[in-house]
Image (cartoon, rainbow, N blue to C red):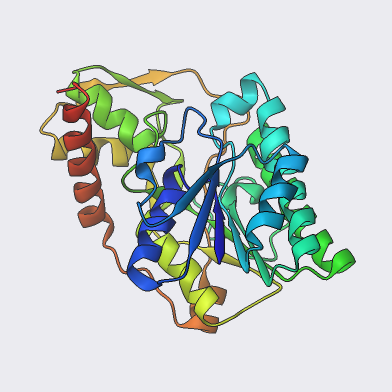
Amino acid sequence: MLLVTGGAGFIGSGFLHYLERVTDEEVVVLDSLTYAGNEEYIPDNCEFVWCDISDKEHVDYIFDKFNPRKVFNFAAESHVDNSIRDVTPFINTNITGTVNLLSASVTVGVEKFHHISTDEVYGSLEFGEDKLFTEQTPYDPRNPYSATKAAAEHMVKTWYNTYGLPYLITSAANNYGPRQHHEKLVPKVVCNALENKVTNMYGGGQQIRDWIHVDDHCDAIWELDKQNILNEKFNIASGNEVPNMEITKKILDILDKPHSLIGVSHERPGQDQRYGTDFSKLRERTGWSPKIDFDEGLRKTVDWYHKYFNLIGIE
């Protein structure tokens, strides 16, 4: 049995829909259904259990009941702006929650704990430099969110070194695709554009991010699982660096909306300039490579949000 945490969220639900296509194994989903989660995103073939992973007693009960073979930990508070306003939920979920899952995994003898992390743990790169994040890049988180994700990675490795829990850590580039909360850039721009509202870009939107479609991300996770690779860390990316301003213009062009719907706001505290992620280790070890063309993937993503926002009354 596979246990997936955070399955009502963006990437977690993407993984559940991916699993529908590739395995018949039983899947149990844990989620606390915060503002960023939606139970409707969980496929019908999965068993859903409400759980706040910061509650150790409840986590222990669930692991004892289901005795999972593998754990895929997608559960996380993830919005940087929220972490700047109040880091407490990020500590509770991203650090304490991860520790509770790790401890319960040791107790029931989990075969693998796969922790899904982010390239933001590495900090920021400079504009114009050739340097990329590798698995050997020192951790240098620059905001409360990424600091809690870096701490969680250290905990995962500690549980392997101390308790022998088999693990895998993957740090992914910026994901885009369906079912993402509208606080994030792509759905936010679509939602604002449909209402002819301006999207204000931090510092003019010159920040560069490496973008990967959520389906490619899930495909890489499953490829690592199929090849039974353990006790290592891999970066997952597509080598597709795009400034936030450019992706915003692409979205407006798809929707046939004017670029005048782009505004400028103040610079966010702890703002990272550029993310660029080297995934050559993953490619060389597994043969995996991203399959989804960015422009085509973005168009299909915008179409998904267009239909979704129409359903909820935003046209």
Is residue 22 depicted above or below 116 in this figure?
A: below
Q: Can you give x and y, in whole percent of width and height, for residue 39 in the image?
A: 41, 39
| Residue 313 horizontal side relative to residue 40, left or right | left
**Residue shown at 66%/50% (left/top)?**
62
Q: Position of residue 13 (x, y in %)?
A: 42, 49
Q: Quadrant of the N terminus?
A: bottom right
Q: Is residue 213 visible?
A: no
Name the quadrant containing residue 192. top left
Which residue is painted at 53% across and 75% down in the image?
224
**Number of marks in the rendered image:** 0
> Residue at the location (40% across, 72% down)?
23
| Left or right of 42 on screen, residue 60 | right
Q: Residue furthest right?
A: 162
One can see residue 65 in this view: yes
Q: Nearer the viewer, residue 234 or 108?
A: 108
| Quadrant housing the C terminus | top left
Q: Nearer the viewer, residue 250 or 34?
A: 34
